Image: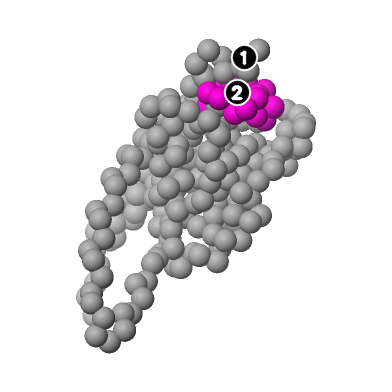
């Protein structure tokens, strides 16, 4: 039976501890709480002192889910429909939309540069800054923060990856299907950041008389 040198065992133990510490350092800190109006808020900053049901979460930057998630997706979409308040704000709004697309989450879009969209955003958040994510009636994330949005979508039951698609078998003697067009290249993911990013709507976004 082979014997392990105490020195080698010590080095391996230190290396394992170092890896664990590094992994913990890379985790994102996200807070979930209910504000005074009864809305559930997700943020990377400590919540106000009068908040209720405060929860602190740490999210690993890497996660993969390979199972067929079509049923979970359908149930989550029925219970917590997703609405993205956005406009043509460039890379920031593109990255916000790309996060939803990467997870295969169906969502509706509200253009906050239009009068009705600006009114809806003002009513929801009391401000004219976007992007804003709404999941269901009371889950609201002001500004784009990938870790915070990920936590909110996870809590709503949305799968972390889109469901796999299985091609149907063609009947005997049928002509092979045409090759599908190359998929469009998705927008690059937003870089990990602790800060929430939001952009003011041009002109304030307030409805015009």
Which stretch appears magenta?
113-131
Residue located beneath label 1 in the image: 208
Q: Could you say which is closer to the camera, residue 209 or residue 91?
A: 209
Q: Could you say which is closer to the camera, residue 49 or residue 34?
A: 34
Say whether residue 32 is visible.
no
For the C terminus, the quadrant is top right
Q: Position of residue 6 (x, y in %)?
A: 27, 61
Residue 170, quarter of the rendered image: bottom left
Secondary structure, mark 1, is: loop
Q: Residue at x 46, y 68 (%)?
A: 68
The residue lying furthest to the bottom in this view is 172
Secondary structure, mark 2, is: helix
Q: Position of residue 155 (x, y in %)?
A: 60, 51
Left or right: residue 139 versus residue 5 is: right
Q: Relative to 13, does residue 111 appear above or below in the rendering?
A: above
Q: Relative to 113, does residue 175 appear above or below in the rendering?
A: below
Q: Position of residue 39 (x, y in %)?
A: 72, 37
Which mark, by number, is residue 48?
none
For the N terminus, the quadrant is bottom left
- Category of crowding for the residue at label 2, using alpha-carbon neighbours closer than 10 angstroms: few (below 14), some (14–19), many (at least 20): some
Task: State yes or no: residue 21 in magenta.
Answer: no
Residue 35, quarter of the rendered image: top right
Q: Are marks 2 and 1 in contact (CB under 8 Å)?
A: yes
Q: Residue at x 36, y 35 (%)?
A: 191
Q: CA distance from mark 2 to mark 1?
A: 7 Å
Mark closer to the chain start, 2 or 1: 2
Residue located beneath label 2 in the image: 115
Q: Could you say which is closer to the camera, residue 100 or residue 65?
A: 100
Task: State yes or no: residue 127 in magenta.
Answer: yes
Left or right: residue 9 versus residue 31 is: left
Q: Residue at x 77, y 31 (%)?
A: 36
């Amino acid at each position: 039976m082979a014997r392990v040198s105490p020195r080698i065992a010590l080095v391996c133990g230190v290396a394992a501890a170092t890896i664990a510490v590094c992994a913990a350092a890379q985790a994102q800190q996200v807070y979930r709480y209910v504000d005074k109006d009864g809305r559930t808020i997700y943020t990377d900053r400590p919540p106000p002192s009068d908040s209720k049901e405060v929860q602190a979460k740490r999210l690993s930057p890497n996660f993969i889910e390979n199972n067929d998630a079509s049923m979970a997706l359908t149930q989550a979409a029925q219970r917590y429909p997703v609405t993205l308040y956005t406009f043509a704000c460039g890379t920031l709004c593109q990255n916000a939309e790309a996060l939803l697309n990467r997870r295969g989450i169906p969502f509706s879009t509200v253009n906050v540069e239009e009068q009705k969209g600006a009114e809806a955003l003002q009513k929801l958040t009391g401000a004219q800054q976007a992007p804003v994510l709404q999941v269901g009636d009371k889950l609201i994330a002001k500004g784009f923060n990938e870790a915070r949005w990920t936590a909110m979508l996870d809590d709503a039951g949305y799968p972390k990856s889109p469901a796999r698609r299985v091609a149907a078998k063609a009947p005997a003697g049928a002509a092979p299907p045409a090759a599908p067009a190359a998929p469009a290249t998705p927008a690059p993911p937003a870089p990990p950041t602790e800060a929430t990013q939001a952009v003011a709507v041009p002109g304030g976004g307030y409805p015009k008389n």
